[in-house]
Amino acid sequence: MSSLAAAERSIAPAAAGSSFADRTFAFVERSHARACALLVLLSLACFLPGFVSLQPMDRDEPRFAQATKQMLETGDFVDIRFQNEARHKKPVGIYWLQAASVAAGEALGVPEARTTIWLYRAPSLIGAVAMVLLTYWAALAFAGRREAFLAAAFMGASIILMVEARLAKTDAVLGACAVAAMGGLARAYFTRGIATLPLPTVLVFWLAVAIGVLVKGPLVPMFAALAVLALFYRERSARWFLALRPWLGVALVLLLALPWFVAIAVKSGGSFFSASVGQDMLGKVGTAQTYHWAPPGFYVVAFFATFWPAAILAVMAIPFAWRHRNDDRVAFALAWIVPSWLVFEAVPTKLPHYVMPLYPAIAIVAVLALSRGFVRPDGPARKIAALLIPFIPAGIMVGLAFAGKTLDGRMPWAGVAVMALATLVALAAWWRFLRDEPGAAALLGIAASPILALGIFAFTNPVLQSIQLSPRLAAVTRSLDCPDRWIGTFGYREPSLVFLVGTDLAMPASPGEAAAFLKAGTCRMLFVDRRYEEAFRREIERAGVRPALLTRLSGFNINGGRRLEIAAYAVRP
């Protein structure tokens, strides 16, 4: 087992031989404040383009947002519901954060705050920025400022965090909690037998665990527990964990998390636990839910895209990690990554963001390997593999251009131009790598990320009107300006429409129920999926209803992967 001092001495200056990289890192590492300020700027440049204009993304995001909206409407901040259905899959933490954000927006006078999706995304944005800064803090336990900065910049520039920062879900906040907890755990492990762990570090660890439990249940404790077990096997002892004062910590976690769990158990009669544990969590373990099944190895394949631009550099660090597996820092990073990764690969239900809390550890190993000269263009295989850096933005550019032309009949030229610029910067990163300047290659890859985000979210997404069907349907409802109006939808049941139109959106389940809905009042609008329109028209003729056909809208359902045509029928006074 290598000592902490020996590990520190083995870290060479990053990106040796690259004056561009040397000057950049020298500028960054002069102070923590400067490094953190630059990380915040990078994060905002990657996360803010399209943050406000991006439509509610079905299906999970509007489900979370709608449940939060209903909390604000009813004043019930214990139970979690989507329309009349109990939503007992995740704990309440993210809903409270979203509710606070929307309430602040209302207080500040944001128009129609409760259907303004970016207010619900604000906790995710804050969580994503916090995850980047906490990656820097965690990495400081492993290396110096420049390595810590590069690891955090890899995290901020990653495609997966760019996506999660824009979605009103749990995962960005969960990622921040996970890296905070693991940063505290790393300090406890590295200082074992050397110094007493400061109380603020202890509190960071346990607060991260408590908030993580309230946000997404057992995942943060799982990451920490699996790492502790792996290190226990390595050390044949877990006495070092006592530095985190577990009795104090468990009491703090129970104090913060237990009241809501007791309240929801009483309010739901225990159904919350049967739904969240028995159906949601164990359902993922036992059988793949709905269409989220994927074979083992899925996360390895997805990693190359989700952790772009650093993914291929991280893969090149694998020989370094194996050779230095007895180094305390590499051993801890592997304990953070490997056990949890294997758990996720073994579970049939797979989504790319599940392993995101493990990416900071991968970033740390990558920068340690880079700083010690292990990430280099040694041989043709590495030189070819590094083409992945420009290939990912080029592939996204081609895919979105094809989508625009195919679905909407027009090319998103401005978006294509910006994404092409991102590809050129990434191509320059590859060229620098070929010249044995991996530090410069890393910085250029990171620089390509905010340009790519600008091209995708600010310039291309607004052109893709076909995937924005719910906002367009919600706009149609504004033409029904009579009092006491009712809106319904038959066949098209996306949560985004519920969020945008209103909690009382009716969803008849059959043509007969759809006709009865229109017959029940004189100020009603019903959206009808074309697949069911013929049967619906027969029923309204039988019921003697003569609704007006206001418009037809066509679009593309990205979840179902099919084209849709929706007709809007209305009866008016």
Image: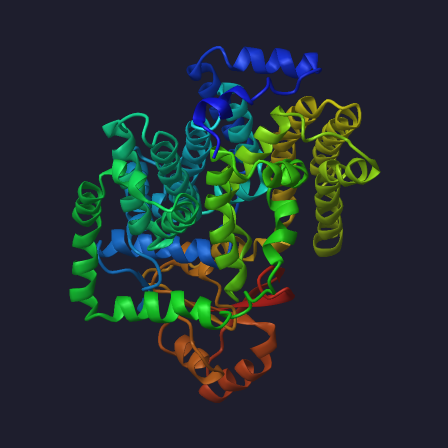
Q: Is residue 103 visible?
A: no
Q: What percent of the width, then of the height, locates residue 343?
A: 48, 58
Residue 298: x and y in percent read 61, 58
Residue visible at 56% across and 84% down in the picture: 535
Q: How is the image coloured?
A: rainbow
Residue drawn where x is 75% and y is 27% of the image = 433
Relative to the observer, which residue lies in front, 319 or 465?
319
Q: Residue at x 42, y 41 (%)?
A: 124
Residue for point 65% across, 17% down: 21
- Identify the residue at the far right of this view: 380
Q: How many marks?
A: 0
- Give the percent coordinates (x, y) of residue 506: 39, 70
Inspect this view and state whether residue 448 appears. yes
Front-lying residue, 172 or 55: 172
| Left or right of 448 in this view: 293 | left
Which image quarter is the C terminus in? Answer: bottom left
From the top left corner, tell me how far across and down residue 22 is, in percent. Answer: 63, 13
Seen in the picture, residue 466 relative to 34 is either above or below; the reply is: below
Locate residue 102: give its quadrant: top left
**Left or right: 159 in relation to 38:** right
- Is 82 situated left or right of 27 in this image? left
Residue 376, by quadrant, is: top right
Residue 428 in which image quadrant: top right
In this rendering, the answer to whether 110 lies above or below 447 is below
- Identify which residue, 5 or 97, lies in the foreground: 5
